[in-house]
Structure formats: structure tokens, C-alpha cells
Image: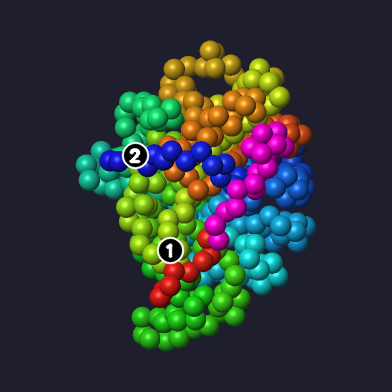
Amino acid sequence: MTEPTTDRTTRVPLSVLDLALVADGSTGVEAIQRAVALATDLDALGYHRVWYAEHHLAPGVASASPAVLAAAVAARTSRIRVGSGAVLLSTTSPLIAAEQFGTIAALHPGRVDLGLGRSFTVPPSAAAATGGDERRNSRAKAAENPIRSTFDGGRAAAGAGDVPRLVDGLYVPPAPPNGFNDPALRERILAQQEVIGVQRQPADFREEVELVLDVRRGTYRDRNGGAYTSPPVEGAQFDLWLLASSGGESARVAGELGLPLAANFHVSPATVLDTVAAYREAFRPGVLEEPYVIVSADVLVAQTLERARVLAEPFADWVLSIRRGERGAIAYPSPSAATAWTDRPDSERALVADRVDTRIVGDPETVVERLETLVRVTGADELLVTTATHDPAETRRSFELLAHAWGGADRASAPDTGRVASGV
């Protein structure tokens, strides 16, 4: 595989993925209120866009309704783009997602992004996990889960290596041990799906994405030739994005349809180079004339490296709660309650090391240097940063320090990802 490395040193636009984290001792109501307030700060600081993910029944994450959050933020800001990272097609049909974001775009044209992620995949049963091709297929599907899934780690990533690599200064870790066939995890996810009420059986992923594009163009026909019109979607001024965590179907479909791609380095750092390479290889002019890649990163900035490390200490506990799967992401712990890395068993370290080791933590100068490396090696056109701390004031301060150190978060002019190639 040819690594997507570039010599570019231009500061690309910065955007934010906000999970509306619930801090230990706080409530979901407070987390949602803080997320909306933070967005107004991000707008003033010059961040290019803010996205909200879809999470359900996770004690530590309040971002359950990306469209509602995006609408609330759009009404309270003047410049920043708003969107989803991502709407999951296991819980929301592509048409309903398009109608939700088309409605927002009608009120805030040119400021809305609809990010779609493939359907949530239940880990294989113990029997399936021991069966060759079925096991590999389950792993490949699991790797496609977008920015968040209940079991967002694991040796599921297509193309992920078993040994760490250093690629032009970027550390690419091995994928973590596979825990997908844990019976307790599987049963919890199945029970959770019953509570959520997941009923729809998604169609082929490309078909679902094409449905959104065709309804927006006003050209959609069902299998019997019947025409349909959705007034909020037809001609709607939102940008359609696909999210991917591997070089599998999501990255390929994004390339084949000429759509922009969000590659999940912060969730699956072992596979980010495969993800970007697969997208660029598959790219054909479509909605876009040229490829456009946003790469996500977990970032925490403090005035000093020592302070940043203290604030970062609870991150391993939080990631472990996701990957073990007892209840999903826990309320984010305080530094004083965190388990020290040196006190953590080797089995726990192995399960979270890829995310801990690739989290970009430090003073402004250190973080900027590492982000520049990420841009150079992946060829990212934009960065999507997410920040987790127990104290919302520290989170806000991290975004402020980064914006100033980057020289103005939106200093670089992001291309219009809604531009249409001629003849399409």
C-alpha cells in the first residue's frame, strides 16, 4: 500500500466533534446545555464546523440526537457549520436523516453537514467467532462502525497490522486485542437494541447513500418506477459526508460517489492510512471534483505539558468502559479518581493502548507539531478534533489554546465541499 503522505505544511481548517460528555457528578441536561454554549465559543474562536455523534444509553455521553443539537446550535451561532458525525443508518433511515438536516438547511443554508455512518453491527456469537470466513466478515463489518460504537475497538480493522509502525513521524499502533466475541458484551448490545427499538433492516450502503442524493436532485424512483418528492430534501443546501474507520465499504462508496470522507483516526488509529488510501483509490468525480478528507483526532491542550498529562489521566478509564462494554461509556471521571497507568493490569493496557498512545496531549506547541504531522502523513484537508476532560472549563480552554496556536482555527479557507463536478 502506498502511504498517503504529502509535504504540505499549510495549516488546514480545524473543526470539532463534540460528544456532549457527561462528567462524573454532573447530569445529561447540564452536558447538553454546555454543548450548546461551547458551540457559541467555537464559533467565535473560528472553528470551521462542529459535529455531533449519535450515542444511545451511554451514561457518559449525552449526544443522542445530532439533528436536534445541530438545529439548536445553528440558531445560536452565525458562521460555524453544524452537522452530524454521524447519523447511524441502523436507527435512522437515510430519508428521515435527509429530511431532518434538510429542514435545518432551509433555515441555515450553506452551514449544514449530514454525516452518515453505516449500521451498527452486533459482535458475532461464540460459534460464529470460531468460523473462518464468517468471523472475518463480522470483523470487517465491525470495523466500519463510525465514530462511535459500543465496542469501538478490537482487532476488527481491515488492513490493521499486529505491530506498531512509525510512518514519517506518525505513530500508527497495532489494533487492540479482539474482544468482540465476549458473550456478555454481545448480550448487552442485543438487549440495548431492544430498548432503543432498532427495527429497520438497512439496504445496501451505496443504495442508501444514493437515495439521499437522488431525492435531493428530485430524480428518485423506487423499484417499480414510482417517483417521490420530499420538499425539505429536494434542492437542500447541506453537504453529505460519509464516515469510515477502515478501508472497507464506507471509504470505497464515498470515493465512488465523489463524496467527502471523514476518516476516524481517533477511534481506529491502526487503520487511518488504509481508510484514506482506499478512499483516494476509489475516488471518481461526483458530488466533488476532487477528494476531500477530514481526519479526526483526540486532542487535549493545556498551558503546560505537565498540566495536560494530569487532565488526560482519566481517558484510559473512559475508553476501557466503552471497550469492555458493561454499560458503555461511563460518566467521565475526575483526574483524582482515575486509575494510574502504572497501576493498570497489562490486559487493560492492551485494550486501550492504541487510543491512549495516539491521543495528542500537551502544551500548544507540542500539540500543533503533532497535528501537523497527522496532516502531512494522511494528506488531510481538514482536522476534526475532539476533547474530553472532566471539567468543562478545561475543555473550553483546550479549544481556545489550540485555536490561537493554530493561528486562527479557520485561517485556511476550506474548499466548498458542496461543489458539483461538471456534468454530474
Residue 38 falls in which quadrant of the image?
top right
- Picture residue at 58% right of the left edge, 73% below the top: 236
In the image shown, does 208 or 275 lie closer to the viewer?
A: 275
- Picture residue at 48% right of the left edge, 45% below the top: 380
Q: Residue 15 in the image: x percent, y percent?
A: 61, 47
Mark seen at residue 3? 2
Mark seen at residue 424? none
Q: Residue 140 in the image: x percent, y percent?
A: 33, 46
In the image shown, does 351 or 214 lie closer to the viewer?
A: 214
Give the labeled residue for mark 1.
289
In the image, residue 117 sits, relative to residue 223, either above or below, namely: above
In the image, residue 273 sits, relative to residue 222, either above or below, namely: above
Q: Amino acid at mark 2?
A: Glu
Q: Are marks 1 and 2 in contact (CB under 8 Å)?
A: no
Magenta residues, start to end: 400-416
In the rendered picture of this protein, how many numbered marks are placed on residues?
Answer: 2
